Image (spheres, rainbow, N blue to C red):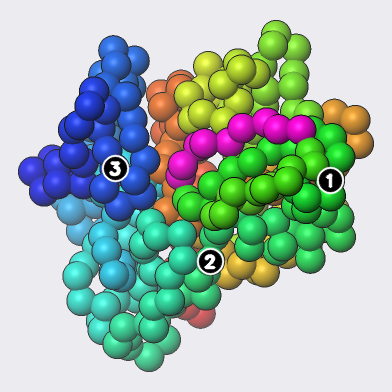
Amino acid sequence: MSRNWLADFKYEDGAWLVKKTGHRVPATRELANDIFTWLTFYTLAQSWRSWRRITGHKRPTIAFYPEKPRPWYHIWPVMHASGAKLISDTSVADIVFQFDDSTETDHTPPPTKPGAKLVNFDCKDISKSNVAAAFERAAGYSLAVDPRTFTGTMVEKSEKNACHDGRILEGPLEQPIEDKTYQVLVDNEIPGGLIEDLRCCICGGEPAVVFRKRRPIDRRFLNENAEVLLDTPANCYSEDEIRVISRFAEEIGLEWGGVDVLRDNASGRIYIVDANKTDMGPPVALKLGHKLKSTRRMAKAFVAAFAPKRK
């Protein structure tokens, strides 16, 4: 692995700081185990990359702008499983990805060749407020609430990407906090004292793979899963719900990424509560065989969406 990757992190006060997002990861034994588990998957995913080089497989070229993904991002193993060749020059690449962890971006596409496929350049704002607004347009019902007038239980979250700082409050509030967003509390509890997120991977603007992410209810806002299961969109959502997810992706310009979908027990409705155009994955808690299986599924969707065979 490149030593430059270490520059993405800074150790301070017993935690690793992710410099780009500001997210802090406690330096625990569990973190060390997660890193070891990821390295096992990384080694196998690296074999796909090596095999493509050995066989001379004809493949599309792909470039990222303004940054390149690290191997822990979902696009990295998918790119190699699909046979795409990573290059630096956007002006000659077949596929050019906008890749930036920032919550808000406004990147004019770099020079590209005629016919190049541009991905995610219209995805400029994944703040929680924009996600909620786009979801309401796509679904026809609201996730967001006005904390000054809403009576009942609600969730307060940071607007920024990857903070995992949600907390449950009772409304109304006299003084909502600036740079926070407020949403309905979705009851997504399942048997066993767990909550379940239906993490939907988007490729070509359409749902492609679902990870059922489960964790203790008292840790609902943390990215620490007790169990992750691989599933399909058709098994998790109705046809109407799949159309809602696709419309949502179109609303925010998300052609590749992940969205967190919660199903409310009382109403049966789905709510999209978060979107990420630089999602990491597959989840560490997913079994190794299913990590590989999900990556191959995403690679197949990647080729169909961004590098179809020319007639």
Give the mark nearer the N terminus: 3 vs 2: 3
Rendered view: 132 above or below 193? below
Look at the numbered disc 3 and give the secondary structure of its residue. Answer: strand
Residue position marked by numbered label 3 in the rendering? 18
Question: Can the viewer see residue 128 in this picture?
Answer: yes
Q: Residue at x 82, y 54 (%)?
A: 142
Instruction: Give how far apart the Cα atoms at labels 3 and 1 are.
Output: 35 Å
Q: Could you say which quadrant of the image residue 233 lies in?
A: top right
Label 1 belongs to which residue?
150
In front: 187, or 123? 187
Q: Earlier in the sequence, mark 1 or mark 2?
A: 2
Q: Which residues are magenta?
A: 162-170
Direction from residue 222 to residue 169 in the image, left or right: right
The answer to if 298 sits in the magenta stretch is no
- Sequence-wise, the earlier of marks 3 and 1 is 3
Q: Is residue 277 above or below residue 193?
A: below
Residue with the mark numbered 2: 125
Who's the residue at 26% across and 60% down the image?
Answer: 68
Where is residue 91? Give x, y as percent: 26, 84
Residue found at the very far bottom of the displayed protein = 114
Q: Residue furthest front?
A: 174
Report the amino acid beneath label 2.
Answer: Asp
Measured as percent of width and height from the top left, residue 170 is found at 76, 33
Q: Left or right? Give the position of 180 relative to 298.
A: right
- Tell me how far mark 1 sits from mark 2, CA to CA: 26 Å
Dot 2 lies on which element? loop
Q: Which mark is residue 223?
A: none
